[in-house]
Amino acid sequence: MAISLPLTQTTISSAMTQTQNNIRLTSTTGVVDGRVIKVGQELVKVSTSETIANPIPVLRGWNGTAARAHAILAAAWHGDPDDFRSLRDSADKHGLTGNGGVLPDYCVPGTIAYDGLGNEYLAVQTTAVSYAGTTVVVSRDGLFSIAVLATGTQGPVGLTVEQTSSDEVTWVLRRGYFAGALEAGGTSDATSASVCCAASSVSTPAAGMAVVESSTSNECQQIHGMFCVGAATSATTSATSATGVRVPVFLHYPYTNGFQSVLETTAHASS
Protein backbone atom coordinates (compact mmCIF):
# COMPACT_ATOMS: atom_id res chain seq x y z
CA MET A 1 0.00 0.00 0.00
CA ALA A 2 1.05 3.62 -0.44
CA ILE A 3 2.77 5.04 2.61
CA SER A 4 3.33 8.38 4.25
CA LEU A 5 7.09 8.51 4.04
CA PRO A 6 8.60 9.55 7.41
CA LEU A 7 11.39 11.51 5.75
CA THR A 8 12.00 15.21 5.16
CA GLN A 9 12.99 16.49 1.74
CA THR A 10 15.13 19.57 1.15
CA THR A 11 18.11 20.53 -1.04
CA ILE A 12 21.74 21.36 -0.43
CA SER A 13 22.28 25.11 -0.54
CA SER A 14 25.88 25.00 -1.74
CA ALA A 15 27.91 22.55 -3.79
CA MET A 16 29.85 19.86 -1.93
CA THR A 17 33.30 18.57 -2.74
CA GLN A 18 34.18 14.92 -2.30
CA THR A 19 36.28 15.61 0.78
CA GLN A 20 34.56 18.33 2.82
CA ASN A 21 33.18 17.20 6.19
CA ASN A 22 30.07 19.38 6.37
CA ILE A 23 26.88 20.00 4.45
CA ARG A 24 24.73 23.10 3.96
CA LEU A 25 20.97 22.49 3.69
CA THR A 26 18.31 24.86 2.41
CA SER A 27 16.29 23.96 5.53
CA THR A 28 17.64 22.40 8.72
CA THR A 29 14.20 21.82 10.27
CA GLY A 30 14.13 18.41 11.94
CA VAL A 31 17.88 17.84 11.62
CA VAL A 32 19.44 16.55 14.85
CA ASP A 33 22.52 14.62 15.86
CA GLY A 34 22.48 11.09 14.44
CA ARG A 35 20.14 11.97 11.57
CA VAL A 36 21.01 10.36 8.22
CA ILE A 37 20.97 12.48 5.05
CA LYS A 38 20.88 10.95 1.57
CA VAL A 39 22.23 13.06 -1.30
CA GLY A 40 22.35 11.20 -4.59
CA GLN A 41 23.74 7.75 -3.80
CA GLU A 42 25.73 8.95 -0.77
CA LEU A 43 24.66 8.73 2.86
CA VAL A 44 26.04 11.19 5.39
CA LYS A 45 25.39 11.11 9.12
CA VAL A 46 24.98 14.22 11.25
CA SER A 47 27.74 14.24 13.87
CA THR A 48 27.50 17.08 16.35
CA SER A 49 26.56 17.56 19.97
CA GLU A 50 25.89 21.26 19.41
CA THR A 51 22.84 23.13 18.20
CA ILE A 52 22.35 22.50 14.47
CA ALA A 53 23.54 25.35 12.28
CA ASN A 54 24.71 25.56 8.67
CA PRO A 55 27.11 24.11 7.72
CA ILE A 56 26.32 20.88 9.56
CA PRO A 57 29.21 18.59 10.56
CA VAL A 58 28.72 15.14 9.01
CA LEU A 59 30.42 11.79 8.56
CA ARG A 60 30.87 11.34 4.80
CA GLY A 61 30.33 8.07 2.92
CA TRP A 62 28.35 6.56 5.78
CA ASN A 63 27.25 2.92 5.88
CA GLY A 64 29.51 1.82 3.04
CA THR A 65 28.46 4.43 0.48
CA ALA A 66 31.04 6.40 -1.48
CA ALA A 67 31.70 10.09 -0.85
CA ARG A 68 30.97 12.07 -4.00
CA ALA A 69 30.82 15.69 -5.11
CA HIS A 70 27.27 17.11 -5.25
CA ALA A 71 25.91 20.09 -7.16
CA ILE A 72 24.10 22.96 -5.49
CA LEU A 73 20.34 22.36 -5.04
CA ALA A 74 20.73 18.58 -5.28
CA ALA A 75 17.81 16.86 -3.54
CA ALA A 76 18.53 15.76 0.04
CA TRP A 77 16.37 13.46 2.17
CA HIS A 78 16.89 13.05 5.89
CA GLY A 79 15.46 10.93 8.68
CA ASP A 80 16.31 8.31 11.25
CA PRO A 81 17.97 5.21 9.77
CA ASP A 82 14.83 3.09 10.19
CA ASP A 83 12.70 5.71 8.42
CA PHE A 84 14.40 5.00 5.09
CA ARG A 85 13.51 1.30 5.26
CA SER A 86 9.75 1.92 5.15
CA LEU A 87 9.79 2.42 1.38
CA ARG A 88 11.86 -0.73 0.87
CA ASP A 89 9.40 -2.65 3.05
CA SER A 90 6.43 -1.40 1.00
CA ALA A 91 8.08 -2.79 -2.15
CA ASP A 92 8.54 -6.13 -0.42
CA LYS A 93 4.84 -6.22 0.51
CA HIS A 94 3.88 -5.59 -3.13
CA GLY A 95 6.31 -8.23 -4.36
CA LEU A 96 7.96 -5.58 -6.52
CA THR A 97 11.43 -6.89 -5.81
CA GLY A 98 10.53 -10.39 -6.99
CA ASN A 99 12.45 -13.53 -6.25
CA GLY A 100 15.93 -12.55 -5.22
CA GLY A 101 15.32 -8.89 -6.04
CA VAL A 102 17.44 -6.37 -4.20
CA LEU A 103 16.62 -2.90 -2.91
CA PRO A 104 18.88 -0.73 -0.78
CA ASP A 105 17.95 -0.18 2.85
CA TYR A 106 17.94 3.57 2.25
CA CYS A 107 15.17 4.11 -0.31
CA VAL A 108 13.78 7.51 -1.36
CA PRO A 109 11.59 8.71 -4.25
CA GLY A 110 13.51 7.95 -7.44
CA THR A 111 14.50 4.46 -6.28
CA ILE A 112 13.98 1.74 -8.92
CA ALA A 113 12.63 -1.77 -8.19
CA TYR A 114 12.16 -4.88 -10.34
CA ASP A 115 9.74 -7.74 -9.83
CA GLY A 116 10.29 -11.40 -10.68
CA LEU A 117 8.97 -10.87 -14.23
CA GLY A 118 11.39 -8.08 -15.08
CA ASN A 119 8.85 -5.27 -14.75
CA GLU A 120 10.44 -2.02 -13.59
CA TYR A 121 8.94 0.37 -11.02
CA LEU A 122 9.84 3.87 -9.86
CA ALA A 123 9.20 5.24 -6.36
CA VAL A 124 7.28 8.55 -6.57
CA GLN A 125 5.51 11.15 -4.43
CA THR A 126 1.76 11.60 -4.87
CA THR A 127 0.03 14.97 -5.04
CA ALA A 128 -3.61 13.87 -5.35
CA VAL A 129 -5.93 10.87 -5.17
CA SER A 130 -5.26 8.31 -7.89
CA TYR A 131 -6.36 4.75 -8.64
CA ALA A 132 -4.53 1.62 -9.75
CA GLY A 133 -3.90 1.96 -13.46
CA THR A 134 -3.93 5.77 -13.58
CA THR A 135 -1.56 7.21 -16.18
CA VAL A 136 0.61 9.85 -14.54
CA VAL A 137 3.44 12.16 -15.52
CA VAL A 138 6.55 12.32 -13.32
CA SER A 139 8.05 15.71 -12.43
CA ARG A 140 11.38 16.65 -14.01
CA ASP A 141 12.77 18.52 -10.99
CA GLY A 142 14.44 15.54 -9.34
CA LEU A 143 11.72 15.26 -6.67
CA PHE A 144 9.79 12.50 -8.50
CA SER A 145 6.29 13.82 -7.77
CA ILE A 146 3.40 12.71 -9.98
CA ALA A 147 0.24 14.23 -11.41
CA VAL A 148 -2.49 12.67 -13.53
CA LEU A 149 -1.50 13.05 -17.18
CA ALA A 150 -3.43 15.65 -19.20
CA THR A 151 -2.99 17.19 -22.63
CA GLY A 152 -0.37 19.92 -22.76
CA THR A 153 1.87 18.35 -20.12
CA GLN A 154 5.18 16.72 -20.96
CA GLY A 155 7.66 14.42 -19.30
CA PRO A 156 8.18 10.78 -18.33
CA VAL A 157 5.02 8.74 -17.88
CA GLY A 158 4.09 5.78 -15.67
CA LEU A 159 1.14 3.79 -14.35
CA THR A 160 0.19 3.72 -10.66
CA VAL A 161 -0.03 0.23 -9.16
CA GLU A 162 -2.44 1.03 -6.32
CA GLN A 163 -4.97 3.54 -5.01
CA THR A 164 -3.29 6.50 -3.33
CA SER A 165 -4.03 9.74 -1.51
CA SER A 166 -2.02 12.96 -1.67
CA ASP A 167 1.29 13.32 0.17
CA GLU A 168 2.15 9.63 -0.01
CA VAL A 169 4.89 7.61 -1.63
CA THR A 170 4.02 4.79 -4.03
CA TRP A 171 5.37 2.92 -7.03
CA VAL A 172 4.62 3.44 -10.71
CA LEU A 173 5.28 0.98 -13.50
CA ARG A 174 7.57 2.38 -16.18
CA ARG A 175 8.57 -0.76 -18.05
CA GLY A 176 6.52 -3.94 -18.42
CA TYR A 177 2.99 -5.26 -18.76
CA PHE A 178 -0.11 -3.94 -16.96
CA ALA A 179 -3.42 -5.74 -17.43
CA GLY A 180 -5.79 -2.84 -16.79
CA ALA A 181 -4.82 0.76 -17.50
CA LEU A 182 -7.74 3.13 -16.94
CA GLU A 183 -9.15 4.63 -20.15
CA ALA A 184 -10.76 8.08 -19.89
CA GLY A 185 -12.92 7.99 -23.00
CA GLY A 186 -14.81 4.77 -22.32
CA THR A 187 -13.60 3.34 -25.62
CA SER A 188 -14.77 -0.23 -25.08
CA ASP A 189 -13.87 -1.22 -28.67
CA ALA A 190 -10.17 -0.54 -28.10
CA THR A 191 -7.88 -3.19 -29.60
CA SER A 192 -4.16 -3.89 -29.89
CA ALA A 193 -4.21 -1.60 -32.95
CA SER A 194 -5.25 1.40 -30.83
CA VAL A 195 -2.83 4.18 -29.87
CA CYS A 196 -2.37 5.45 -26.29
CA CYS A 197 -2.73 9.24 -25.90
CA ALA A 198 -3.02 11.80 -23.13
CA ALA A 199 -6.68 12.21 -22.16
CA SER A 200 -8.19 15.45 -23.49
CA SER A 201 -10.88 15.48 -20.81
CA VAL A 202 -11.04 14.54 -17.14
CA SER A 203 -12.86 11.30 -16.39
CA THR A 204 -14.25 10.01 -13.08
CA PRO A 205 -11.99 8.77 -11.67
CA ALA A 206 -9.28 10.70 -13.49
CA ALA A 207 -7.57 8.20 -15.80
CA GLY A 208 -4.97 10.26 -17.68
CA MET A 209 -4.99 8.09 -20.81
CA ALA A 210 -7.34 7.67 -23.75
CA VAL A 211 -6.98 5.42 -26.78
CA VAL A 212 -7.67 6.31 -30.40
CA GLU A 213 -8.19 3.96 -33.31
CA SER A 214 -5.26 3.73 -35.71
CA SER A 215 -7.49 2.81 -38.67
CA THR A 216 -8.67 6.40 -39.15
CA SER A 217 -7.07 9.84 -39.08
CA ASN A 218 -6.73 11.05 -35.49
CA GLU A 219 -5.13 14.00 -33.78
CA CYS A 220 -3.89 13.41 -30.25
CA GLN A 221 -0.99 13.88 -27.86
CA GLN A 222 0.60 10.47 -28.17
CA ILE A 223 2.25 8.68 -25.25
CA HIS A 224 5.43 7.38 -26.84
CA GLY A 225 6.51 4.01 -25.46
CA MET A 226 3.05 3.00 -24.20
CA PHE A 227 1.32 0.35 -26.31
CA CYS A 228 -2.23 -0.97 -26.26
CA VAL A 229 -1.85 -4.76 -26.52
CA GLY A 230 -5.39 -6.14 -26.31
CA ALA A 231 -9.10 -5.54 -26.14
CA ALA A 232 -10.65 -3.24 -23.55
CA THR A 233 -12.78 -4.63 -20.74
CA SER A 234 -15.36 -3.00 -18.47
CA ALA A 235 -14.31 -3.30 -14.83
CA THR A 236 -14.50 -1.67 -11.43
CA THR A 237 -11.80 0.98 -11.24
CA SER A 238 -11.81 1.97 -7.58
CA ALA A 239 -12.47 0.68 -4.10
CA THR A 240 -15.86 2.47 -4.07
CA SER A 241 -18.39 2.70 -6.89
CA ALA A 242 -16.55 4.12 -9.88
CA THR A 243 -16.62 1.89 -12.95
CA GLY A 244 -15.09 2.28 -16.37
CA VAL A 245 -12.96 0.78 -19.09
CA ARG A 246 -9.56 -0.82 -18.65
CA VAL A 247 -7.04 -1.55 -21.39
CA PRO A 248 -4.07 -3.98 -21.29
CA VAL A 249 -0.87 -2.12 -22.11
CA PHE A 250 2.89 -2.59 -22.33
CA LEU A 251 5.22 0.21 -21.25
CA HIS A 252 8.78 0.84 -22.35
CA TYR A 253 9.88 4.01 -20.54
CA PRO A 254 6.94 6.03 -21.91
CA TYR A 255 6.96 9.79 -22.24
CA THR A 256 4.97 12.57 -23.86
CA ASN A 257 6.36 15.71 -25.45
CA GLY A 258 3.23 17.79 -24.86
CA PHE A 259 2.38 18.26 -28.55
CA GLN A 260 -0.66 17.08 -30.45
CA SER A 261 -0.17 15.71 -33.93
CA VAL A 262 -2.08 13.82 -36.62
CA LEU A 263 -1.16 10.16 -36.33
CA GLU A 264 0.21 8.48 -39.44
CA THR A 265 -2.28 5.70 -40.19
CA THR A 266 -2.78 2.86 -42.63
CA ALA A 267 -5.42 4.98 -44.34
CA HIS A 268 -2.86 7.76 -44.94
CA ALA A 269 -0.19 5.40 -46.15
CA SER A 270 -2.47 3.88 -48.81
CA SER A 271 -3.79 7.20 -50.13
Image (cartoon, rainbow, N blue to C red):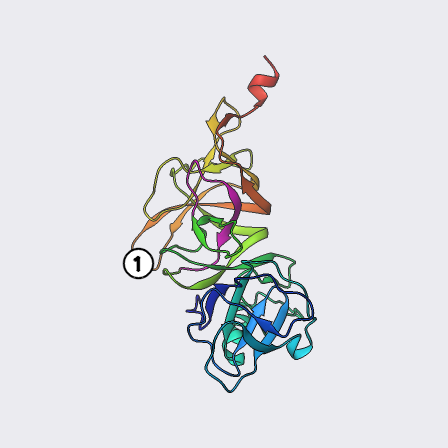
**Within 10 Å of the Cα at label 1, are there few (<14), some (14-19), or many (20+) other Cα atoms?**
few
The residue drawn where x is 63% and y is 69% is: 42
Looking at this view, is 151 or 51 the one in front?
A: 51
Q: Where, by quadrant of the figure, is residue 226 drawn?
A: top right
Looking at this view, is 232 or 199 the one in front?
A: 199
Question: Is residue 18 covered in magenta?
Answer: no
> In the picture shown, does residue 60 fall above or below 268?
below
Q: Residue 250, image x and y in percent?
A: 58, 46
Looking at this view, is 161 or 156 the one in front?
A: 156
The reply to whether residue 62 is in sight is yes
Q: Residue 157, image x and y in percent?
A: 52, 47
Q: Residue 14, image x and y in percent?
A: 56, 62
**The N terminus - image quarter:** bottom left
Amino acid type assigned to the residue bearing label 1 in the image: Thr
Image check: 216 left or right of 18? Answer: left
> In the picture shown, does residue 182 fall above or below 72?
above
> In the picture shown, does residue 180 fall above or below 79?
above
Q: Where, by quadrant of the figure, is residue 271 drawn?
A: top right
Say which element carries label 1: loop
Q: Residue 229, image x and y in percent?
A: 56, 42
The residue drawn where x is 34% and y is 41% is: 202
How many numbered discs, if any? 1
For the record, the magenta segment spans: 148-163
Q: Where, by quadrant of the figure, is residue 163 drawn?
A: bottom left
Q: Which residue is mark 1?
A: 240
The reply to whether residue 104 is in sight is no
The residue drawn where x is 41% and y is 69% is: 4
